[in-house]
Amino acid sequence: MKVATAEEMRAIDSETINNYGIPGVVLMERAGLAVAAKVKELVDRVNVIIVAGRGNNGGDGLVVARNLRNDGWKVKVFLAARPEDLKGDALLQYKTALKFGVEIEPVQDLIGNSALIIKGHCIFIDALLGTGLSKDVTGVFGQVIDTVNASGKPVFSVDIPSGISSDTGQVMGRAVKAAYTVTFGLPKRGHLVHPGAEYSGKLFVEDIGFPQPLLSSEKINVELLEKKDVSSIIPERRRYSHKGTYGHVLIVAGSRGKTGAALMAAKACLRGGAGLVTLGVPETMADIFQSRVTEEMTLILPGKRDGTLSRKASRIILDFLERKADLLAIGPGIGVSPETEIIMKDLLKNASSPIVIDADGINSIRGVAGIFSKTKAPLILTPHPGEMAGLLSVGSKKGKKGRSKYPESADKGIKRDVEQNSINTALTFARDTKTYLVLKCIPTVIATPDGRAFINATGNPGMATAGTGDVLTGMLSGFLSQTMDPLRSCILGVFMHGLAGDIAAKEKGMHPLIASDIIDNIPRAFSALTDDERTYFS
């Protein structure tokens, strides 16, 4: 399903009216009726308080009021505008609501008498601001939002909670905390990213008659991953096949104190369907790894006394990629040192096989100017926001040897910007560097070199625990070994990683969930996507 910005949704609305000939008042009517129907479906008949603004969002709210009033509900509208300031379709709906006997009062009456008005069984319907918000909420609108939130009553928001940016999901000063949000045509970015998703509550996307070609236009470059889409791209297991059919992955990971990262990545890679997995480890740690691997093979790499890799390892890794492996996954637990920085530079400059880079692999290339322009291998990077901040220091002011002189405080500022604008950050970086980016924000965003992005719908807070990123690296690499399609492997890896985590959370609970629980539930995630008769989540 496509995910729209406010501007994209305005364009759809405009084209529907001007080119398809559906009047705006008809769309407003359908929107209001959709909200009213959802209210009737979800709550018993209660008193309804509607806060409405002067624009189209307020007009939608007036349609809701009239429909509920006509059906015998007790409804009162508090209007955040003077009636004489209403225009167009909103003015028409105001006049119609009055004819149907809807009580409409100034919003100041609610602010000044909220204790008397908000009592008994009631709900709020928020039709105050809509998707066009571009500045922080202040003044009367802020007071209304505070009053609604302080009431403790369930809130239905029309289109988007008032005060949430529809493009970034950020709170614009203050915002309504909705239990339910009913939006139209397409979900907006702000419904799906943090913190907008929490403020939106349960989201319903209703069809109000927008033409399908507009809703599926390629001009809209962000999509929400859905089960049906992911199910259709799971790699086929052909009857006549063998382990070589499904690829050989070299995973370079682990160091002293971080052996678990390597082992989890390797196990998850096999669970994801890779035919062969070789674990590249420092020679000083080889005995420890040899005693713990089962299905995995090992490649002994030159190491240092401290249990990390030596720069000499890059030559052996490149040779192994040339002769045996189909792709490389590197980074989990390898540490960051001058040696790992040299290794990463060598690999990115000389490898031709696909490379998945995570964790310390990413941290070893932060601040290195122009490094991505020198690569010939397809690259997938899987940073969390802090690692992304380091990647964005590429091209900043340089110190000796081309290293970034970004101060730590600046990195924290970049990290905050990444978290607050994750989709555009991912889109820009992937396009500029010609890489595939898996940005592990809330939710995870996948971005491609050709300017598309995908928002993941699976996963839960229980997965905020050590090692889950290593599991994702392994799963993603396992899918890449079978398909050699970077985008397909990113979609499968991210969605199924979250799905396995969701299944694990239902079984274990969120608090005790650990990364190995996700690995254990990868088979059930496959079953949930490929066998409609078996359901592990509902």
Image: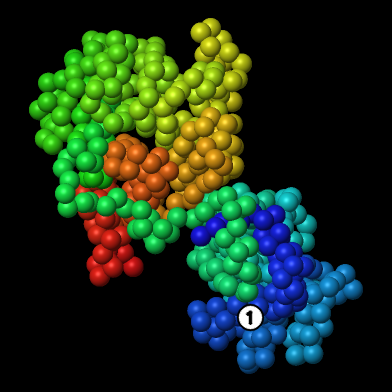
Residue 255 figure quarter: top left
Instruction: Residue 494: give x, y in percent of width and height.
Output: 38, 47
The quarter in which the C terminus is drawn is bottom left
**Depth check: 159 or 136 in front?**
159
Instruction: Residue 123: give x, y in percent of width and height.
Output: 59, 76
Q: Is residue 469 above or below residue 134?
A: above
Instruction: Residue 257: give x, y in percent of width and height.
Output: 25, 24
* Residue under label 1: 33
Display coloring: rainbow
The 10 Å Cα crowd at callout 1, few under 14, some 14 to 19, many 20 or more, is many
Indicate left or right for 93 with 242 as reference.
Answer: right
Q: Measuring 13% from the left and 36% from the top, which residue is drawn there?
A: 295
Res 393 seen here: yes
Q: Is residue 404 above or below residue 73?
A: above
Residue projecting furthest to the front: 240
Residue projecting furthest to the right: 84
Indicate left or right for 199 with 142 as reference.
Answer: left
Q: Measuring 36% from the left and 49% from the top, which residue is drawn there?
A: 492
Q: Measuring 34% from the left and 21% from the top, which residue is drawn there?
A: 335
User: In terms of secondary structure, where does tag 1 sit?
Assistant: helix
Instruction: Residue 169: give x, y in percent of width and height.
Output: 59, 52
Residue 112 figure quarter: bottom right
Indicate left or right for 317 with 114 as reference.
Answer: left
Q: Measuring 25% from the left and 59% from the top, which residue is drawn there?
A: 527
